[in-house]
Image (spheres, grey):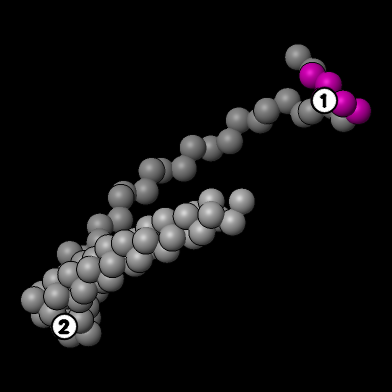
């Protein structure tokens, strides 16, 4: 059966030989440890990482508190002016 796609006529599908299935490629499990080894050499110990994350969390909380106080003062000054 001939089908028309816009202005071109499609050729009938031809039977192509079936290629043998490739066996799945196995990855050497030793390579999975390489990034972890590199990170363990580059990054400091876990106590230092937890300490830094704690400092960042404290800075975020204090920044949110400062923004809240500033916003409260700014809105109060706006009310007094109008």
- 58 shown above or below 13: below
Q: Is residue 24 magenta?
A: no
The residue segment tinted magenta is 3-7
Q: Quadrant of residue 41?
A: bottom left
Please provide percent x and percent y for residue 23. 31, 49
Label 1: element kind = strand
Residue 77 visible? The answer is yes
The residue tagged 2 is 44
Asked which secondary structure carries label 2, the reply is loop
Q: Quadrant of residue 58?
A: bottom left
Look at 51% across and 59% down and name the residue there: 77
Left or right of 24, for residue 7: right
Image location (x, y in percent) of residue 8: 87, 30
Dominant secondary structure of the residues highlighted in magenta in the image: loop
Q: Nearer the viewer, mark 1 or mark 2?
A: 2
- Above or below residue 2? Residue 25 is below
Residue 4 lies, in percent from the top left, at 83, 21
Residue 34, above or below 26: below
Q: Is residue 51 left or right of residue 35?
A: left
Looking at this view, name the residue that lies furthest to the top: 1
Specify which label sits upstream in the sequence, 1 or 2. Answer: 1
Q: Nearer the viewer, residue 78 or 64?
A: 78
Query: Hey, which quadrant is residue 67 in on the image?
Result: bottom left
Q: How many marks?
A: 2
Q: Nearer the viewer, residue 15 or 1?
A: 1
Location of mark 1 (residue)? 5
Residue closest to the far right:
7
* Foreground pick, 26 / 52: 52
Inspect this view and state whether residue 31 appears: no
């Amino acid at each position: 059966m001939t089908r028309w796609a816009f202005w071109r006529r499609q050729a009938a599908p031809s039977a192509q030989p079936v290629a043998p299935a490739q066996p799945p490629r196995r990855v050497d499990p030793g390579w999975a440890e390489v990034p972890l080894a590199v990170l363990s050499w580059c990054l400091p110990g876990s106590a230092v990482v937890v300490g830094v994350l704690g400092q960042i969390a404290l800075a975020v909380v204090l920044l949110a508190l400062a923004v809240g106080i500033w916003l409260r003062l700014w809105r109060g000054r706006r009310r007094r002016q109008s």
